[in-house]
Amino acid sequence: MVLLFIRHLDIAIKKHEIMSVIGWIKRTTLIAIAISLEVAVMLWLMFYFFTETLILTLTPTFMRTQKSLRGKVVVLTGGAGGVGQELALRLARANAKVVLWDINEEAMVKVKDNLEKEGHQVYCYTVDVTDRKNVYKNADLVKQEVGVVDILINNAGIVCGNTFLDIPDYMIEKTFQVNILSNYWTVKAFLPDMLRKGKGHIVTVSSLTGMLGTYKCTDYSATKHATIGFHESLHTELKTHGHRGISMTIVCPYFINTGMFAGCKPNMPMLTPREVSKRIITAIKQNEVYVTMPTWARFVLPLKQ
Ligand SMILES: NC(=O)c1ccc[n+]([C@@H]2O[C@H](COP(=O)([O-])OP(=O)(O)OC[C@H]3O[C@@H](n4cnc5c(N)ncnc54)[C@H](O)[C@@H]3O)[C@@H](O)[C@H]2O)c1
């Protein structure tokens, strides 16, 4: 009797084992199919986006669709600086409604006078972009006085230019506040309207030092790396949530002879604010996501890995 019971038990266990082996095979097969499908979709998307990038990169500018800037309300931070002035001029010439934000009121008035001499109307606001409340208050003023903002260009920036131990603590904090934290406040101030309208454009002026750590730039370079992380993450969020009408552009230029890096002797000649601003305008008109100056840097810099 006992032997019979043990035998039945043995058969039941074996049967159970066979069932669980079949279950395991089924589960593993389903997981393998799911993974294969995901890999196939990923490969297809990689192929699609790579081909799209290649075609767009090789297509001459005059053959690409250009967005009109006429009547667009553009907020430009750091609008009184080297790159800012040139950008303001080009935006005004493209008939955009230019709104300058800068902490340097005197320099901003000069830019305004120059543009008005050419017959353009410019709106100026003295804003410290590191001051969150000041940013929100002035954003509301712009909406009331000029209109809902179509394009935001985060261009304000500072650099200290010292080796790590020689950078005063307050300068490290300030560099982070101006170069990256301010972007959170400005984007928070203007993105909700863009989402409501279903269109808009956020432009970030970063730097090649945001792709490659640079001598005497432990603070500056880190903030510019952060702008790239900010840009990529926000871009992914917007795409994931289906906000395809909102474009994002990040611009990473090499040294520009605006005086920001005065005294620095780079290996290649510095870029001019004129060529940088011209490139930024083209990037905005073509809804480009990544811009490096010079262009080849974008293909060479990944080699650092
Ligand atoms: N000059 C370069 O070599 C170089 C290279 C790559 C990227 N960049 C980036 O290009 C952008 C423009 O640089 P630039 O060369 O025209 O510099 P710039 O110093 O000529 O202009 C910067 C402007 O930002 C303004 N600003 C600074 N702090 C501010 C604040 N708290 N609130 C509001 N405005 C403030 C300044 O008053 C100034 O008008 C910056 O983001 C910079 O990091 C510059």
Image: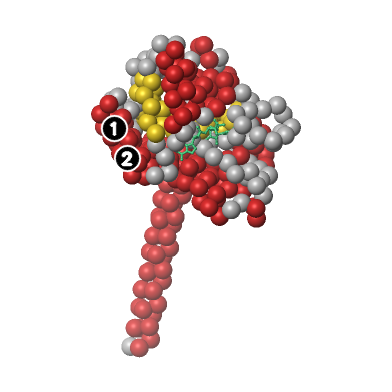
Q: Which mark is residue 113?
A: none
Give the residue drawn at x 53%, y 52%.
Answer: 170
Q: Quadrant of the N terminus?
A: bottom left
Q: Position of residue 210 (x, y in %)?
A: 58, 40
Give the residue number, with chain letter if any, for mark 2.
Answer: 136
Q: Quadrant of residue 216?
A: top right
Total numbered labels placed on residues in the image: 2
The answer as to whether callout 1 falls within 8 Å of ligand 1 is: no
Q: Is residue 77 above or below residue 21?
A: above
Secondary structure state at the residue bearing disc 2 = helix
Give the residue drawn at x 71%, y 33%.
Answer: 266
Q: Quadrant of residue 27?
A: bottom left
Residues packed near mark 1 inside 10 Å, few (<14), some (14 to 19) or many (20 plus): few
233 lies left or right of 196:
right
Q: Position of residue 119 (x, y in %)?
A: 41, 11
Give the residue at the far front of this rendering. 106
Q: Is residue 81 visible?
A: yes
Q: What's the amino acid at mark 2? A: Tyr
